[in-house]
Amino acid sequence: MTAQAQSLTRPITFNAARFEPVPFKVYTQRDFDQIVPLAKLSEAQRFEMKVVSSVLPFRVNQYVIDELIDWDNIPADPMFQLTFPQRGMLAPEHFDRIATLLEHGADKKDVDAAVDAVRHELNPHPADQMEMNMPRDEHGNRLEGIQHKYRETVLFFPSQGQTCHSYCTFCFRWAQFVGDKELRIASSEAETLHAYLRHHCEVTDLLFTGGDPMVMKTRHLRDYLEPLLKPEFDHIQTIRIGTKALTFWPHRFLGADDADELIALLERLTEAGKHVALMTHFNHWKELDTEATQAAVRRLRKAGVVIRGQGPLIAHLNDDPDVWARMWKTQVRLGILPYYMFVERDTGARNYFEVPLVRAWEIYRDAMQQVSGLGRTARGPSMSASPGKVEIQGVTEVAGEKVFVLRFIQGRNPDWVQRPFFAKFDPQATWFDHLKPAFGDEKWFWEDEYEAIRDDKLSIES
Ligand SMILES: *Cc1c(COP(=O)(O)O)cnc(C)c1O
Ligand code: SF4
């Protein structure tokens, strides 16, 4: 049997031992020397990791080390690329600057200053997240930890959920994990959230995000979620939880600490008629191929939770249509709904991870062609830009001009959604702001309205 056939027919088993409490053990930049299998790498390679992780966040746990990474295939292994720093993630000039300081045992103060300078050159605040999405109360105070960009959906960043079980090397929220306080958009005030939702009956979806809200204790989650069962929150139909715990720490849903209480809480919500959606971050079918993850999926589905899969397209990790096709097929088999393919955002180590938009579209199309209709529910490739989520629908020729066909999947103005529009074809473009309107147009059809919304939001700011 081929490896592929084996995986696709793996029986989903419940091994009672899996439900025993499993300790959570985590490693950060200080602990490289304690990660046993890293001994396979040379001293020089380990030093490179220390350099890169001085700038970009690093955190990995024992489950990822033991169950996801194929140590016979490092550094190419995609799960290794997902979690461990690589030299190419920093521009050579940045790398050398930090490496020289570390080699010469420079003062911490000087290293910190150099690290800070490099971080500021990596566009730590993409897409105006702070300025344009944070609502205010009736007195004009900014509501910490809440973002409300699209009419139906409110994002909430609980302060106890602003870390993750491991960090993804490409994470667009990297800056908040390295202590950029300005970027820490978090609230511990359940009351702030509930008051906001009470007054916004147009909101149907509440999306818990982070970091990863699943790092929170169940009792904290309960304080936020259980009050939503009151009739005054009937308009909140869907509670979404954005997480990567299903693949970084599936024991969160099995035998860890308060897993049983978590499952009971989710079940209470679904039985009361709420749609509970676990918006799960997946990058590769390998993440779905462990017994613990498959058992966690089964347990969540039994509690009535709907699991949706989404994730970015990343060079060195999943820039291959066969990886996406196999991932979507595996998701469908496990009862997970493929939801989004994202384009990697323009921040952090983007030079290492980015994929040209035209290539992203080819990978998406090729993968789609390999799966049945149930796997074709994934939208994309989609760019979360300041005006909205923009999908690359394809490349074609109109009136003799080669163009990208685009559409808004979400827009700051709902009226923009589902109107096709066109950008000049550019084989090198990797992000929305590289694109120019096609046919010699000076502006996008939505540009004046967007500027007006922007001016309005930013003027309140000052
Ligand atoms: C993606 C996103 C949402 C949800 O969009 P859906 O298309 O409904 O999944 C909400 N708010 C923000 C800021 C987003 O980026
Ligand atoms: S799980 Fe999500 S928030 Fe956490 S590091 Fe990965 S991409 Fe970033």
Image (cartoon, rainbow, N blue to C red):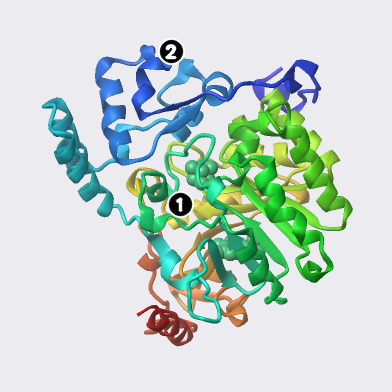
Q: Position of residue 195 (x, y in %)?
A: 66, 70
Tell me the CA gap for discs 1 and 2: 31 Å
Helix, strand or loop at label 2? It is: helix
Mark 2 residue CB less than 8 A from any atom of ligand 2: no
User: What quarter of the picture does the C terminus occupy?
Assistant: bottom left
Q: Looking at the image, how many numbered discs can be counted on the residues?
A: 2
Q: Residue at x 47, y 39 (%)?
A: 168
Q: Is residue 325 left or right of residue 33?
A: right
**Mark 2 crowd level (few <14, some 14–19, many ≥20, 10 Å Cα):** few
Mark 1 residue CB less than 8 A from any atom of ligand 2: no
Helix, strand or loop at label 1? It is: loop
Vertical comparison of 281 with 52: above or below: below
Q: Amino acid at mark 2?
A: Val
User: Which residue is nearer to you in this view: 33 or 339?
Assistant: 33
Which labelled disc corresponds to residue 344? 1
Q: Is residue 72 left or right of residue 277?
A: left
Q: Position of residue 345 (x, y in %)?
A: 43, 55
Q: Amino acid at mark 1?
A: Glu
Is residue 393 visible in this depiction of the protein?
A: no
Q: Tell which circle, 1 or 2, labels the residue nearer the N-terminal end.
A: 2
Q: Position of residue 375 (x, y in %)?
A: 72, 48
User: Which residue is nearer to you in this view: 411 or 231?
Assistant: 231
Q: Position of residue 73 (x, y in %)?
A: 46, 19
Vertical comparison of 217 with 210: above or below: above
Q: Residue at x 60, y 30 (%)?
A: 286
Q: Circle 2 is placed at which residue position?
A: 36
